[in-house]
C-alpha cells in the first residue's frame, strides 16, 4: 500500500475554523482555512454561530481544496475528519459531511483525534523541517488543552501531564481581556511582549503536583494585580501595556518550561515537540531554542501554518491510519470530549 498514490482529503471543524486539505503521500497539495470573524464582537467563540458558519463554509472550502490540489474528487483515496474533541455543533457539521462524501464516493472514512493530529503535524513532508524520532515528548498547548504527551509511535500516545483546570491559551486570552485587548488576545500579548520588560511585574508560579498544570489561579492573580494598579492609577494599563504583556508571557512560558524540564528528567527523553495554537507564541519558541543550547534538548517546532487548527494535520493523521487500514464505519459519531 505504501507504494500507491495515496490522496487523503482532511476535514477540520472542531471550533471556529472550517478547513480542508489534500495530502499526497504525506505532502500537502492544498490547505484551505475559512476563519469566522463573527466571534470577535462577542469576545470569544459562540458555539451556535460557529456551527452555522461551518454549514456555510464547508462546501466551498472542500471544493477549493480539491481544485487547488489539481485533482478530481474521484482521485481521493480516503476522507479523514475531526471526530473530537471540540464544540459539538461544529464537529457534527464536519462529521456529517465527511460521512456523506465518503458514502457518495465509495471510499474509506477515517476518524481523527484533533489533539493527536496536532502532534502528527510534525510528520507532514516539508523542506527544511526535521521530524522527531520516537519516542519524544509533545507539549500540546491550545485554547482548550495543555498536555505533556509521551509519543512512542504514531498512535501510541500517553498523556503524562495536563491542566487541572484552564488551558494555557485561555490564560493568554483572559489576561488580554483583563487588559482591554480584543479577542483573540493571545497573539496581541505576544506582539506587545516583544517590546516590554519581562521582569517588570512578577506573577506567581502555581504549585501543582507532578507534571500537571493549573492556570486558574494565574488568571486571578493577573486580574487582582490590574485592579489594584488601576485603582491607584487609572492610566496604568496604557502606560505599562508592553511591560505587563511581557511579564505575563514570561511567567506563562516559565510555568510550561519548568514542567517540561521535570518531564525530561523523569522520562529521560530529551526530544521535545510543540503542537497546538499556542505553539505559535514567540516566547515559547525562543525558550525551546534556548533549551536546545542550554540542556542539549532536540526541539521540534512546526511550521507556523500547522500550529493553529488546520486540515493538513487531520490529513496526515488520516494518511498513517490509511496505511494501517484503520477505517471507520458510518455509525461513528462526533465526540466533544475525546481522549486518546
Image (spheres, rainbow, N blue to C red):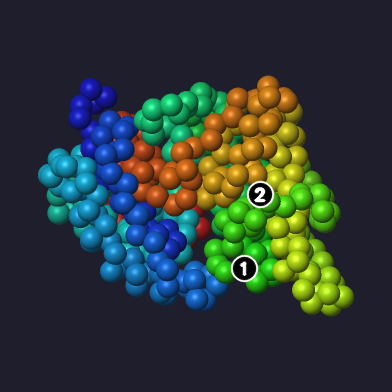
**Tag 1: Cα neighbours inside 10 Å, few (<14), some, or many (≥20)?**
some
Q: Between label 1 and label 2, give the one nearer the viewer.
A: 2
Q: Is residue 137 visible?
A: yes
SS type, badge 2: loop
**Which residue is located at x 34 percent, y 59 percent?**
34
Q: Position of residue 164 (x, y in %)?
A: 69, 55
Q: Which residue is mark 2?
A: 194
Q: Is residue 108 visible?
A: no
Left or right: 30 as drawn, with respect to 247: left
Asked if residue 34 is positioned above or below residue 266 in the image, the reply reads below
**Which residue is located at x 64 percent, y 34 percent?**
288
SS type, badge 1: loop
Q: CA distance from mark 1 to mark 2?
A: 16 Å
Asked if residue 179 is positioned above or below residue 2 in the image, the reply reads below
In this view, the residue farthest toward the right is 232
Mark 1 or mark 2: name the one nearer the start of the chain. Answer: 1
Identify the image quadrant of residue 135: top right
**Which residue is located at x 81 percent, y 49 percent?**
199
**Mark carried by residue 148:** none
**Tag 2: Cα neighbours inside 10 Å, few (<14), some, or many (≥20)?**
some
Give the quadrant of the N terminus.
Answer: top left
Asked if residue 214 is positioned above or below residue 264 in the image, the reply reads below
Left or right: 193 as drawn, with respect to 26: right
**Which residue is located at x 26 percent, y 34 percent?**
24
Q: Which residue is mark 1?
A: 181
Amino acid at each position: 500500500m505504501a507504494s500507491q498514490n495515496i490522496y487523503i482529503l482532511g476535514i477540520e471543524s472542531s471550533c471556529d475554523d472550517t478547513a480542508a486539505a489534500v495530502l499526497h503521500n504525506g505532502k500537502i497539495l492544498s490547505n484551505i482555512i475559512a476563519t469566522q470573524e463573527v466571534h470577535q464582537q462577542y469576545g470569544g467563540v459562540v458555539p451556535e454561530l460557529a456551527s452555522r458558519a461551518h454549514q456555510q463554509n464547508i462546501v466551498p472550502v472542500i471544493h477549493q481544496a480539491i481544485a487547488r490540489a489539481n485533482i478530481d474528487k474521484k482521485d481521493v483515496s480516503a476522507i479523514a475528519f475531526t471526530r473530537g474533541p471540540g464544540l459539538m455543533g461544529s464537529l457534527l457539521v464536519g462529521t456529517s459531511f465527511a460521512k456523506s462524501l465518503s458514502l457518495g464516493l465509495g471510499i474509506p472514512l477515517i476518524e481523527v483525534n484533533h489533539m493527536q493530529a496536532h502532534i502528527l503535524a510534525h510528520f507532514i513532508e516539508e523542506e527544511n523541517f526535521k521530524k522527531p524520532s520516537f519516542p519524544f515528548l509533545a507539549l500540546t498547548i491550545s485554547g482548550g488543552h495543555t498536555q505533556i504527551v509521551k509519543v512512542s509511535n504514531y498512535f501510541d500516545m500517553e498523556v503524562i501531564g495536563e491542566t487541572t483546570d484552564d488551558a494555557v491559551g485561555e490564560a493568554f486570552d483572559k489576561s488580554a481581556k483583563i487588559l482591554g485587548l480584543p479577542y483573540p488576545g493571545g497573539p496581541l500579548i505576544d506582539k506587545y511582549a516583544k517590546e516590554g520588560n519581562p521582569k517588570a511585574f512578577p506573577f506567581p508560579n502555581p504549585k501543582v503536583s507532578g507534571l500537571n498544570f493549573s492556570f486558574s489561579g494565574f488568571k486571578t492573580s493577573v486580574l487582582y494585580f490590574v485592579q489594584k494598579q488601576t485603582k491607584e492609577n487609572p492610566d496604568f494599563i496604557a502606560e505599562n501595556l508592553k511591560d505587563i504583556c511581557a511579564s505575563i508571557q514570561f511567567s506563562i512560558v516559565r510555568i510550561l518550561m519548568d514542567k517540561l524540564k521535570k518531564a525530561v528528567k523523569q522520562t529521560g527523553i530529551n526530544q521535545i515537540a510543540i503542537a497546538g495554537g499556542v505553539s505559535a507564541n514567540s516566547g515559547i519558541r525562543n525558550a525551546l531554542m534556548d533549551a536546545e543550547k542550554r540542556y542539549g534538548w532536540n526541539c521540534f517546532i512546526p511550521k507556523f501554518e500547522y500550529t493553529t487548527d488546520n486540515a493538513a494535520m487531520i490529513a496526515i493523521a488520516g494518511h498513517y491510519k490509511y496505511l494501517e487500514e484503520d477505517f471507520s464505519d458510518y455509525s461513528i459519531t462526533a465526540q466533544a470530549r475525546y481522549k486518546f
